[in-house]
Image (cartoon, rainbow, N blue to C red):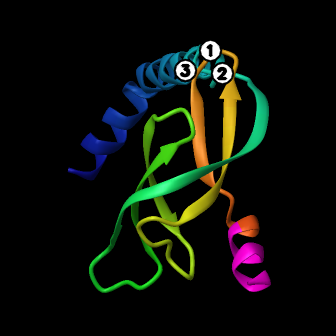
């Protein structure tokens, strides 16, 4: 029985190598054409917390819904202590990308520094 498995492995070695090479080539093509858009700007903005929900059993992580100065609402997941409360103004970073999309992140360093300075 042992010789059957050895002969099968040797007989199909070229087929396995060809399939592996094709899969690696497909992965290379995918990696070359699936690049994220280029980030073109980062600017500080502020937003007001509209809704704050802590995760169960946690005191410093959860979801926020914030309202930007232009009236748009954005949802964020944050892990920061102290956790922002409803009605507070929080500092964000607005990242703008070449395709026009925007990403908002809590500026944790400004948030902590603002909290310590009060």
**Circle 1 residues within 10 Å: few <14, some 14–19, many ≥20:** few
Q: Is residue 93 left or right of residue 33?
A: right
Q: Earlier in the sequence, mark 2 or mark 3?
A: 3
| Magenta segment | 111-118
Q: Position of residue 61 (x, y in %)?
A: 44, 73
Q: Main secondary structure of the magenta part?
A: helix
Q: SS for tag 2? A: loop
Which residue in the structure is indicated by mark 3?
21
- Report the disc number at residue 87: none
* Residue found at x 61% / y 20%: 28
Residue 106 point in image, percent of width and height: 61, 57
Would you name the residue on which mark 1 appears?
Answer: 99
Answer whether labels 2 and 1 touch (C-beta < 8 Å). yes
What secondary structure is marked by label 1?
loop
> Foreground: 3 or 11?
11
Q: Residue at x 58, y 37 (%)?
A: 103
Name the foreground residue: 98 vs 29: 98
| Residues at marks 3 and 1 touching, judged by CB atoms closer than 8 Å | no
Quadrant containing the C terminus in the rendered view: bottom right
């Amino acid at each position: 029985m042992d010789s059957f498995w050895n002969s099968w492995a040797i007989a199909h070695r070229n087929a396995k190598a060809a399939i592996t090479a094709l899969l690696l080539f497909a992965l290379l093509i995918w990696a070359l054409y699936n690049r994220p858009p280029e980030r073109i700007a980062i600017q500080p903005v502020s937003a007001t917390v509209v809704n704050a929900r802590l995760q169960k059993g946690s005191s410093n992580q959860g979801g926020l819904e914030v309202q930007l100065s232009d009236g748009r609402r954005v949802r964020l997941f944050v892990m920061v202590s102290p956790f922002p409360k409803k009605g507070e103004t929080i500092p964000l970073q607005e990242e703008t990308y070449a395709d026009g999309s925007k990403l908002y992140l809590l500026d944790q360093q400004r948030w902590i520094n603002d909290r310590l300075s009060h």
